[in-house]
Amino acid sequence: MAAASSPPAILGREGLEVQINANRYRGFALAVATAVVVGAVVGLVTGVGVALIVGLLAGIGTAMVVAAGVWWAGAPLALALAGANPTHPVDQPRAHNLLDSLCAGAGVAKPRLAVVDHPSIDVMAVGRSPAHATLVVTSALLSSLSLVEMEAMLAHQVVRIKADDTCPATAAVAGPGALAVLVPWAARLADRAARSAEAEVAGRRRASGTNGVGGVSGVRAAGVRAAGRSGDYAADLAAVALTRYPPAMVSALEKVLASPPPGVPNPALSRAIGHLWTARPHLEDRIRALREL
């Protein structure tokens, strides 16, 4: 179980602050970038069809609305797309008790806990800040993992919440993710380009021992990078520093790897939240790194 006297900090306090600020900047940048793209399109169309000044005002107004929407609506949209239902400690006492202990040890406010009815063993976290975070687990995770395995998976997400990784990850839902759903042809082009690039650099990445975000679609890869998910290895280290039991994380990730990836009722919408779930192309590397601890 988590030890409240042992903070999960792999980074020092200054390093953690740098990471938090970087994540918040990425979230803000995603909101602004999405707003600029949509505002420019609306302004251009309106300017050509009506008048230049009307187009300018329409573009600015649209951009402001879109920026606010990306920033505030990302988490509710992600939870709705995933079909997540909030839980009460009476309904899921094990998960809530583990979260209480882990958050006390990590020094972070306890996130809300929600459950998705799905046969996949997985977990994700959303929220524009630690104070507004929600941790989502699948029903299969609750029923299939042992207590220490569940603790390990939750600890990983608690570490990410503390570092504010959820800020850009959540903004990516209503930003690039939503655009991919609304403009599917652009998403297909991104996927094709990503597969071509992946085939070219896969051997070089393995030879150099680096861990990129290969093996995922172009849209999802963009979401993974923007969301800071390339820090999963560091989060694993911080999580096992919190739980003090690396074998539980290894065992849990092996079960995640053997289960199907989560989906949503409409597969076309999975692009918007796919980056929030566990990035399966990295699991074998993460398991291998944890076994070396």
Image: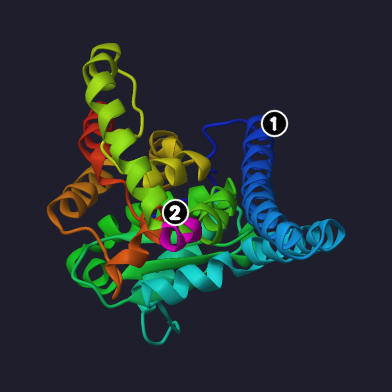
Judged left or right of residue 194, residue 42 is right
- Three-letter amino acid code of the residue under disc 2: Gln
- Regarding residue 123, the answer to whether it shows in the image is yes
> Please, which colouring scheme is shown?
rainbow
Point out the image quarter for the N terminus: bottom left
Give the residue at x 57% y 31%.
11
Please name the residue that numbered disc 1 is placed on.
14
Instruction: Please name the residue shown 21% across and 70% down the image.
Output: 140
- Start-end of magenta stretch: 178-183
Residue at the (44%, 57%) spot, across then down: 183
Q: Position of residue 216 (x, y in %)?
A: 29, 42
Q: Residues within 10 Å of mark 1 (few under 14, many from 20)?
A: few
Within the magenta stretch, is there residue 106? no
Please identify the residue farthest to the right as the structure is shown. Answer: 53
Q: Position of residue 98 (x, y in %)?
A: 41, 65
Q: Whole-percent x and y of residue 218? A: 36, 41
Please identify the residue farthest to the bottom as the structure is shown: 90
Secondary structure found at label 2: helix
